[in-house]
Amino acid sequence: MSKKCIVCSNNDNVLPVYESSKTFIFPENSLEQCITLYSHCKTCKWSYYPNSYSHDTVKKHYIRREQFLNTDVFYFGGECVYFHRIFLSFSIALMTMRASFHGFVKYFNDIFINKTIFPEKKLDEKNFQISWIVYCILKLLLQRSNEEVIEIPYAFYDKDESNAFFHRHKSQLYSVFVKYWSNQAMHKTSHCTTSCTDILIVDGHQKTARTTCKFNNCYDNTIDELGPVLVGCPRSVSKNSEIKSNALCEKHLEIVGKRGISAIEFDASDDVTDETCNVKRNELSDNETRSTTYGFLVFFYSCGIAAGSDESIQSESLRRVLRHLIRIGRMSKLPLELYMIQRVR
């Protein structure tokens, strides 16, 4: 918690300290009541908490590197404070026993409910789930980047704020993931050998198809060798009951409303023709009524480690596979041998 305002440059006074509402701290194996203090600047109206600072009027919430990495206790608002050991316990349970949030929270409450003088207070599944995800993402971003301050949603229960937060950092998080799991020196399993990263296997999984936005005019033109590659919109269809969605997400529903139905159409002049690519498939015309994705691509090494994936929204052509591999190659070193699993239908 900052004792001086870091926003007001001319504020040299020590900020007054206040007591937050009743809070409970969840260590690894107990439940205790605690006092959470925060300081408040009356000049600029910013409030400083143990791990963050926020502004209630503009609804902004920020995490500072020093406040986050140099503590064992985490408070993201509300009445729950978490010790880092309970986050670690769930992470271990997730990796070793495939534990779910529901199962872990039920276990915690059943085991420790008789060991506390606050029997009415329990570990809340949704709050714990949000806090654990935020903790893991912030730890990854702050440890693998030079960012000193990261903005987080003012309210994680707000769907739009949370989606914007994950969308803002998804490319950076994916790059960190690929670099880590492609570097054998940073990890090893019992199946790893000195040559397990010499072979790359690519496989497609179609059983995970989900319904997504049908906006067609979404393509990647960042790879000169391939030209524009049809990607599709990964967002879910709008569930606004007051507006007819036409199978579009909130963002593209607004775009079509402003520009007309022509905005949804993929420009044929931007596509690769049959003369320039003899392995091209036209998913848009072949499956005009399809409303679900084509699953996802995953690449893994011979030791079983999956080091990258890519969801196939509206395309499953070979150019989409090549795009996936080129993107991986920009983040890490590709092996000398590549195998692609192809099933005959």
Image (cartoon, rainbow, N blue to C red):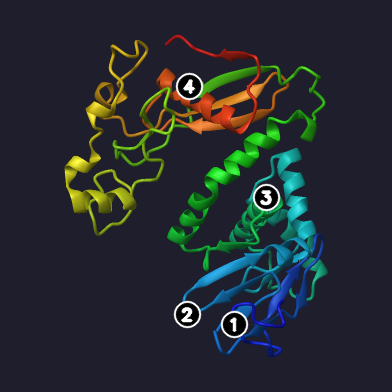
Say which amino acid is labelled 3: Leu
Q: Secondary structure at mark 3?
A: helix
The earlier-in-sequence mark between 2 and 4 is: 2
**Disc 3 to disc 4, how far (Cα)?**
28 Å
Q: Secondary structure at mark 4?
A: helix
The earlier-in-sequence mark between 2 and 1 is: 1
Q: Is residue 334 left or right of residue 203?
A: right
Say which amino acid is labelled 4: Leu
The earlier-in-sequence mark between 1 and 3 is: 1
Say which amino acid is labelled 1: Cys
Picture quadrant where residue 320 is located: top left
Which residue is the site of mark 3? Answer: 140
Image marks 4 and 1: residues in contact by CB distance under 8 Å: no
The earlier-in-sequence mark between 3 and 4 is: 3
Q: Is residue 194 left or right of residue 24?
A: right
Please report the residue visible at 78 percent of the width from the left and 35 percent of the height from the top. Answer: 186
Image marks 2 and 1: residues in contact by CB distance under 8 Å: no
Q: Residues within 10 Å of mark 3 (few under 14, many from 20)?
A: some
Say which amino acid is labelled 2: Thr
Residue 196 is at least partly visible in this image: yes
Which residue is the site of mark 2? Answer: 57
The earlier-in-sequence mark between 3 and 2 is: 2
**Disc 1 to disc 3, how far (Cα)?**
30 Å
Residue 187 is at least partly visible in this image: no
- The quadrant the C terminus occupies is top left
Indicate the position of residue 177 as horizontal and vertical percent values. Answer: 64, 39
Which residue is the site of mark 4? Answer: 322
Depth check, mark 1 against mark 3: the one in front is 1
Front position in the image: 329 or 340? 329
Please report the residue visible at 35 percent of the width from the left and 16 percent of the height from the top. Answer: 280
